[in-house]
């Protein structure tokens, strides 16, 4: 079979393009090297949907961000992923920074960013965000900025794409791409695919994929950002707080999450290893110091996790979205910040390229843009809960007690389109293990459920795919093996 | 929706919950136990080592044996219980909402509630360790469950961070399974668990205990490949140049336990600084008729002490229903108990002045080890009202004192006392 389009890479960009394409009467597949989608940059980033004032006008990412931000409203409604326009503050700590903010405001208004305002009344600022530092002298308020859970959004995009016929192949690392007579043959470690068009959305590894068809015109460098996450209830922020940006980065922000946590980060370290998501002592110190400039009373004792993510930084500092010289090969690479904010606009642009390539874009008759909201224990009234358990008893078995997650939510996560196959997959889809105990209680139970539902042994259950198994064998077996070795000698 | 009611509802069927329920039933009142796991017993079921019951039964039992004695009694007394049932809400008028698979939503009306939800393991030690987040990092209790209940090994070569009791017990358990425990690493200059576990679980098996060290980096992208440990100074800051690499495929964390009080907070009870609820000398929380006992109140050294405290809670719940329930009792005021020098926390947090003629059991932990000390109670005028000598104090041992305040010289107007543990002035002759 020959696909019309194959997307390489199951991050938010790949899944967003997949979902946008699923509207049309086309044969589409997405292939991902990891055990799950949303495993790379998508999994560990700030989750901020930017208003769009930050990027300079000469970059394409400015327009795409402004457009992308607007597209979020409809997408969140259709796909039922958590998204809130809570607004952001860029915080000036010195009088001379105000001019800079005013300049950004003016340009932003001209470019159609809604509601941008400069607030200099300290009392008003404090009222809007009581946790902000007393040293604030003014803020640029962008009410259209929002927060989103990037991985939950990506799962929603993938589910809806799969509902509408897109095929997903995880654990399929691409090793070779051949193109002949306008047909690409993609070799992966688990099978071969043929397609007329390829969309390279491989994130940090986009250059590697591009070079497979002989296109080598950009460089992608990993830039690490570390984060610290604080417990729910430890602090309640109303706004996303940014420092005055520097030339290279938006700086270390302090931001609420949709689940009521607060996080601080990221810093920006250029590194060489595209798999190095380790956190460092110096880095964690740096982000705390940075965060304290904006929120002096960060609840340090309530930190529950630190983690790092890698941004894919192109040498041009702008998105590389190209209909390339290889007919049918589209690069969507170097999607650095504000990539998440821009993804729906990026997908529109890619559809435009496909149209230019002669792909027939006929809307499917049975296209359904709605991805139903996942049922959550916490959203039910007592009456609804009672009815749910009577219909399906697994709603009555609580697996994760920190976040109150019943077995039913975990079963839904496993059996959803593009469902969870790993413990992390479940954690990121429905949150068991995200809470205070960080999986201390629920992990053995989640392993039990995965083993049963996927019909695999306990030892085969992994954290996030190959070589991340939890259990190494049964008790006694190891002792017996050792004894047997002894006998042979 | 299924409805139940009982004089007393006990939440949790571990060592604390069962002991308090038995006490209530024996006192002639009706009681219902709610347990979230699929059997009675709580965490003792996975503690298959011995050392339980020396105080309670004057016999040495394993955890499951200890639990079984209580399970038998619960069954003999025909105490009703709900298993696999999770309480998620307690209302102001003591309605309890829970769910399970058979009954769906459950509403239970109670005159009194005993909170006995136990504790959970701290993960704090883990989160400040920089490095990767590979598979192969477990809390000691989680590993214990895998090995003792599920029958699986979480790894082959181990480093254990923290010398808590479960960590040391797991070091021995894993050694028996043919695994190699490379080291137990403790950030404090002393062991944080019981001495008997240090001797019987580490020294007897030549497992190195490395104090004043901590794990400063986790290696391995997919699975743990090793850890870097470093010496720390008094402020627990890493001493540069003291790093050592230890190869292992698994890191266990045994960095302490923390009372599990999500439900207590939801119900609206106040917590004190040990993360357990604020209680008076009757183990009653700031919510009238709601009592707390066992590890949900304070982490105990021995399960026997948990059972003893739980019996007190049971007795006090009976007293509440018989004497105070829906009756107006004259308020005679309270004395607040605060922790002073080298006292991490003190229970009770509050003493009712109406109970001043009763024996009051004080329990507390010190912040750091000390020898030849005085335990002192001071009133708000800093006057010492009570002193007791002790040869040594260590954080791993909970201290218990029974005092009848009417026997000591306490001003009836006192509103606040402070407990401190201070070095005794040098004396020439040892008095202890």
Image (spheres, rainbow, N blue to C red):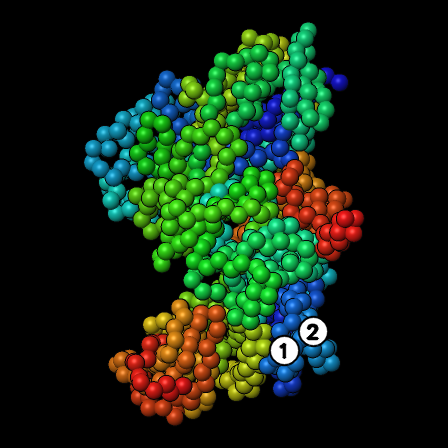
Give the secondary structure at mark 2: helix
Q: Which of the pair B58/A384 is nearer the observer?
A: B58
Q: CA distance from mark 1 to mark 2?
A: 9 Å
Q: Which residue is under mark 2?
A: B65
Q: Nearer the viewer, residue B171 or A372?
A: B171
Residue at the (37%, 50%) spot, across then down: B239
Q: Is residue B233 above or below residue B273?
A: above
The residue positioned 64% from the left and 58% from the top of the image is B175
**Taking B87 as reference, is A69 above or below it?**
above
Q: Quadrant of the N terminus of chain A?
A: top right
Secondary element at image label 1: loop
How far across and down, in percent of the image, does residue A22 sit? 64, 25
Chain containing mark 1: B
Count neighbours of disc 2 (C-alpha within 10 A) and say few if under 14, some if 14 to 19, many if 20 or more: some
Instruction: Name the chain letter of the residue that bears numbered label 2.
Output: B
Q: What x and y, as percent, mark residue A176? A: 65, 18
Q: Name the residue carrying label 1.
A: B53
Q: Position of residue A35 (x, y in %)?
A: 64, 35
Say which residue appears at 26% left-offset and 29% top-offset. A100
Tell me, yes or no, whether the two marked residues, 1 and 2, touch with CB atoms within 8 Å. yes
In this rendered view, identify the residue nearer to me: A214 or A18.
A214
**Looking at this view, is B124 or B199 the one in front?**
B199
Above or below for B37 versus A464: below
Q: Position of residue A377 (x, y in %)?
A: 61, 52
Q: Is residue B45 left or right of residue B420?
A: right
**Residue B104 visible at all:** no
């Amino acid at each position: 079979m020959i696909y019309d389009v194959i997307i390489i890479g199951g991050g938010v960009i790949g899944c967003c393009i997949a979902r946008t394409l699923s509207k049309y009467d086309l044969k589409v597949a997405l292939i991902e090297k990891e055990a799950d989608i949303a495993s790379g940059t998508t999994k560990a980033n700030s989750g901020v949907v930017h208003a769009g004032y930050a990027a300079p006008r000469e970059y394409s990412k400015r327009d795409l961000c402004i457009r992308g931000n607007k597209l979020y409203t409809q997408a969140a409604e259709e796909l039922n992923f958590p998204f809130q326009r809570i607004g952001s503050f860029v915080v000036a700590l010195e009088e001379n920074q105000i001019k800079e903010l005013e300049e950004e405001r003016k340009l932003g208004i001209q470019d159609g960013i809604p509601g941008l305002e400069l607030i200099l009344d300290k009392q008003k600022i404090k009222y809007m965000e009581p946790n902000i530092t007393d040293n604030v002298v003014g803020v640029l308020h962008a009410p259209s900025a929002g927060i989103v859970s990037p991985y939950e959004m990506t799962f929603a995009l993938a589910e809806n794409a799969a509902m509408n016929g897109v095929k997903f192949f995880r654990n399929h690392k691409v090793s070779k791409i051949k193109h002949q007579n306008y047909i690409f043959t993609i070799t992966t470690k688990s099978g071969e695919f043929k397609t007329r068009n390829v969309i390279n959305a491989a994130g940090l590894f986009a250059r590697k994929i591009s070079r497979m068809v002989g296109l080598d015109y950009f460089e992608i460098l990993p830039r690490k950002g570390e984060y610290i996450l604080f417990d729910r209830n430890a602090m309640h922020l109303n706004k996303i707080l940014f420092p005055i940006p520097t030339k290279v980065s938006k700086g270390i922000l302090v931001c609420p999450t949709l689940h009521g946590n607060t996080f601080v980060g990221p810093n920006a370290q250029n590194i060489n290893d595209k798999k190095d998501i380790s956190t460092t002592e110096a880095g964690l110190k740096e982000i705390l110091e940075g965060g304290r400039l904006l929120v002096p009373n960060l609840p340090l004792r309530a930190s529950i996790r630190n983690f790092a993510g890698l941004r894919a930084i192109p040498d041009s500092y702008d998105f590389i979205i190209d209909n390339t010289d290889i007919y049918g090969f589209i690069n969507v690479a170097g999607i650095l910040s504000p990539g998440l904010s821009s993804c729906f606009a990026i997908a529109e642009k890619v559809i435009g390229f496909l149209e230019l390539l002669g792909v027939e874009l006929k809307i499917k008759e049975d296209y359904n843009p709605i991805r139903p909201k996942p049922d959550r224990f916490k959203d039910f009234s007592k009456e609804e809960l009672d009815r749910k358990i009577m219909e399906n008893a697994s709603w009555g078995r609580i697996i994760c007690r920190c976040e109150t997650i019943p077995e039913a939510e975990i079963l839904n996560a496993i059996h959803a389109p593009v469902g969870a196959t790993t413990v992390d997959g479940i954690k990121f889809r429905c949150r068991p293990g995200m809470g205070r105990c960080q999986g201390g209680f629920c992990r053995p139970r989640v392993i039990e459920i995965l083993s049963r539902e996927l019909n695999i042994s306990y030892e085969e259950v992994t954290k996030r795919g190959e070589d991340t198994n939890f259990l190494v064998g049964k008790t006694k077996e190891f002792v017996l093996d050792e004894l047997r070795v002894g006998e042979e000698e | 929706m299924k409805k139940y009611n009982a004089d007393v509802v006990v939440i949790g069927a571990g060592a604390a919950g069962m002991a308090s329920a038995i006490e209530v039933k024996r006192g002639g009142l009706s009681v219902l136990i709610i347990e979230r796991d699929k059997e009675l017993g709580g965490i003792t079921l996975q503690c298959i080592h011995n050392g339980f019951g020396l105080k309670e039964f004057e016999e040495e039992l394993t955890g499951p044996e200890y639990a079984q004695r209580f399970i038998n009694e619960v069954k003999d007394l025909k105490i009703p219980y709900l298993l696999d049932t999770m309480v998620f809400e307690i209302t102001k008028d003591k309605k309890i909402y829970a769910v399970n698979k058979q009954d769906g939503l459950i509403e239970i009306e109670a005159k009194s509630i005993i909170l006995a939800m136990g504790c959970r393991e701290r993960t704090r030690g883990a989160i400040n360790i920089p490095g990767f987040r590979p598979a192969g990092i477990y809390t000691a209790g989680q590993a214990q469950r895998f090995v003792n209940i599920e029958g699986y090994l979480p790894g082959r070569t181990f480093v254990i961070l923290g010398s808590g009791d479960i960590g040391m017990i797991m070091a021995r358990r894993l050694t028996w399974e043919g695994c190699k425990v490379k080291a137990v690493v403790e950030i404090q200059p002393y062991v944080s668990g019981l001495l008997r576990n240090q001797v019987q679980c580490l020294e007897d098996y030549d497992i190195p205990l490395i104090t004043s060290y901590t794990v400063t980096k986790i290696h391995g992208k997919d699975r743990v490949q090793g850890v870097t440990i470093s010496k720390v100074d008094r402020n627990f800051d890493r001493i540069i140049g003291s790093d050592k690499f230890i190869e292992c495929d698994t890191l266990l964390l045994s960095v302490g336990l923390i009372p599990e009080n999500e439900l207590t907070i939801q119900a609206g009870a106040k917590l004190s600084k040990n993360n357990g609820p604020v209680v008076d000398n009757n183990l009653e929380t700031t919510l009238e008729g709601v009592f707390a006992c066992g590890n949900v109140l304070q982490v105990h050294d021995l399960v026997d002490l948990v059972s003893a405290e739980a019996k007190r809670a049971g007795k006090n719940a009976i007293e509440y229903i018989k004497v105070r329930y829906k009756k107006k009792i004259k308020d005679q005021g309270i004395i607040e108990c605060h922790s002073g020098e080298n006292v991490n926390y003190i229970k009770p947090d509050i003493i009712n002045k109406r109970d001043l003629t009763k024996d009051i059991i004080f329990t507390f932990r010190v912040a750091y080890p000390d020898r030849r000390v005085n335990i002192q109670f001071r009133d708000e005028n800093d006057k010492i009202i009570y002193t007791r000598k002790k040869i040594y104090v260590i954080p791993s041992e909970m201290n218990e004192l029974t005092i009848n305040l009417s026997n000591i010289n306490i001003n009836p107007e006192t509103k606040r006392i402070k407990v401190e543990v201070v070095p005794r002035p040098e004396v020439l002759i040892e008095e202890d």
